[in-house]
Image (spheres, grey):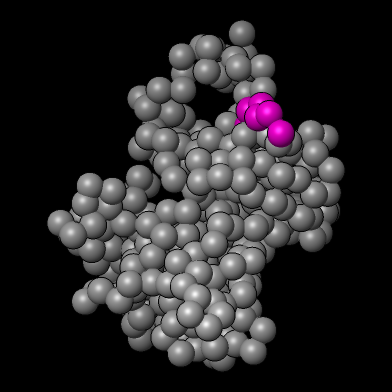
Amino acid sequence: MALTFHKYHGAGNDFIIIDNRDGFFTASGKDNPKDIAALCHRRFGIGADGLMTLGKAVGFDFRMRYYNSDGKEGSMCGNGGRCVAAFARQAGITGKNSRFVAIDGPHDTEMVKENIPDFVVKLRMNDVQWPYLEEEGYQLDTGSPHLVIFEEEISRLDVFTLGRKYRYLDKFLPRGVNVNFAELTDYEQLRMRTYERGVEEETLACGTGAVAVAVAAYVRGVKSPDSSYLLKTKGGELRVKFTPPGENGSYFTDVWLTGPARHVYSGELPW
């Protein structure tokens, strides 16, 4: 029996998506870390930063499960959430708007543009608590744990070596942390590069990382009039908008991540 898969990317952050509403992927036993890592391998498999399944969920349009390229189930993935929403729309599973549940809870999406195979998707993220200022940078959780470090000329940084160093610091274990290097290029605009745990490499974009960088920039004093920030990554541009905490508040609310989602191709795995 063959299993159909779909390849999507969000600003270069690429994913394998499998429609698991019939439960076949789970029932086949292929949802184990070894096989998922093999599918994500860039030389011996399809190649991706991660794999997502779309399943049934009572009270929601679908359930999103995300696995890092090491095969282990991961935390929330912002670019992945936009891509799976685009897939659901393209497959006729949802309308222009959808509501799904992921490991960190419910999420809403809106289709900003639809020009198959290209989509622009808005994804509502969870509220974000005011960051902790560590010696290394700003630590916060945007659905995944992140460290944001502001630097100059980040294009010159050895992101793999530096990111790996911070990712495995004892203070961040056992979960580890995604490491973002950010540079202010213009008012309300920032460049960013991310070392992702679970992928253990620099990725071309990171959605939860973009949210983390935007929030950290606000806390650092870069305050856009409408709390909207453009994040420039190696793979494309992402937009983050939120409502800052009110007086005596500690949470950023109404957090939206907007960016591209593209269907690259579909295929079959002869299992």
Which range of residues does the magenta coloring cover? 54-59
Residue lying at the far front of the rendered structure: 248
Q: Front-most of 167 and 216?
A: 216
Q: Is residue 57 left or right of residue 137?
A: right
Q: How far from the left and from the top, in percent, is residue 27?
A: 53, 12
55 in the magenta segment: yes
Question: Which residue is at a point 46% across and 90% down the rendered structure image?
Answer: 221
143 in the magenta segment: no
Rendered-image quadrant of the C terminus: top right
Q: How far from the left and from the top, in percent, is residue 7?
A: 61, 39
Residue lying at the far top of the rendered structure: 1
Q: Is residue 214 visible?
A: no
Q: How far from the left and from the top, in percent, is residue 193?
A: 42, 68
Q: Is residue 101 above or below residue 77?
A: above
Question: Which residue is at a point 56% across and 41% down the rendered structure image?
Answer: 102
Q: Is residue 62 left or right of residue 213?
A: right
Question: Which residue is at a point 65% across and 58% down the rendered structure image?
Answer: 124
Rendered-image quadrant of the N terminus: top right
Q: Is residue 25 left or right of residue 88?
A: left
Question: Which residue is at a point 54% across and 77% down the rendered structure image?
Answer: 245
Q: Front-most of 21 and 2?
A: 21
How many tags in the picture? Answer: 0
Q: How far from the left and from the top, in percent, is residue 86?
A: 72, 46
Q: Is residue 163 left or right of residue 140?
A: left
Q: Is residue 269 visible?
A: yes
> Mostly what secondary structure, the magenta segment?
loop
Q: Front-most of 246 and 11?
A: 246
Q: Is residue 185 above or below residue 148?
A: below
Q: Quadrant of residue 70?
A: top left
